[in-house]
Image (cartoon, grey):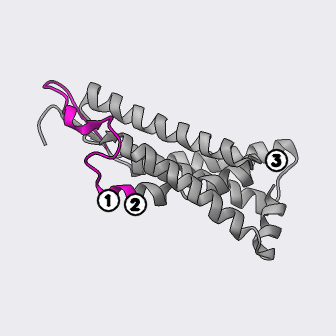
Amino acid sequence: MRNDQYVIPGPPVLLPLGVLIMVISFLVLRRRGELTMTRLLVTWLAGWYAVAVLGATLLPLHLSFGGDPQLFRINPFPLTHVRPRDSLLNVVMTLPFAAVLHVVFGIRDKMRVIRLGFLMSLAIELTQGVLILTVHDNRWAEANDLIANTLGVYLGFVAFQWLLRLPLLRRVVKDAV
């Protein structure tokens, strides 16, 4: 590591953030009079999912000052230089997104879920691109990730709709909403 490079590690950021989300969700649900054990647990799971996505996409954050940004880390052209393993991980990462939207926020419309998943992915890729250009982060920002993430959201939506046919899951979701 060069002298002018700093690393913001994941755990010291992610763990307090996850606990903060847990406390805030508890307080919000209690204030609204919607506090049940099922709602609280589902909200906590959704919060930790968001923390995991943040950790997987942005942390550890490598900051480097001086020198030229590594522009090869930005690929705006879809389906070029595809890394199958990364694409698979991006699909898997976004599979739970539709379930979170359904259970926590009551969003059930397929096209709205896909749009929100696309926008979340776009925000991640744009943030990674800005970090590459400004502080020379070592992440990749590419259109392939946008496609893989959106595909993962769609597949997660389909799988969640199929799983809702199971009486036990349907009952748990009904209790959480």
Which stretch did the figure color magenta?
61-87
- Whether residue 15 appears in this view of the structure is no
Q: CA distance from mark 2 to mark 1?
A: 6 Å
Q: Earlier in the sequence, mark 1 or mark 3?
A: 3
Marks 1/3: CA–CA distance = 44 Å
Q: Amino acid at mark 1?
A: Pro
Q: Is residue 126 left or right of residue 25?
A: left
Label 1 crowd bin: few (<14), some (14–19), many (20+), radius 10 Å: few
Q: Which residue is mark 1?
A: 84
**In contact (CB < 8 Å): disc 2 and disc 1:** yes
Give above or below for 15 relative to 66.
below
Q: Nearer the viewer, residue 57 or 166?
A: 166
Q: Residue furthest right?
A: 33
Res 146 → quadrant: top left
- Verify whether residue 35 appears in magenta: no
Reading the image, the residue beneath label 3 is 30
How would you rate the neighbour count of disc 2 (Cα within 10 Å): few for under 14, some for 14-19, many for 20 or more? Answer: some
Residue 84 sits in quarter: bottom left
The location of residue 126, given as percent across then percent down, is 41, 32
Q: Is residue 84 left or right of residue 167?
A: left
Q: Is 68 included in the stretch rendered in magenta?
A: yes
Please give the residue where the numbered disc 2 appears in the rendered image: 88
Kind of residue sitting beneath label 2: Leu
The C terminus: image quadrant: bottom right
Q: SS at mark 3?
A: helix
The picture places residue 103, in percent across and down from the top left corner, at 73, 55
- Expressed as whole percent of the image width and height from the top left, the position of residue 170 reads 79, 68
Please tell me which residue is depicted at 34% across the width and 56% down the height of the picture: 86
Q: Is residue 76 left or right of residue 122?
A: left
Residue located at (23% from left, 32% from top): 136
Closer to the N terminus: mark 2 or mark 3? 3
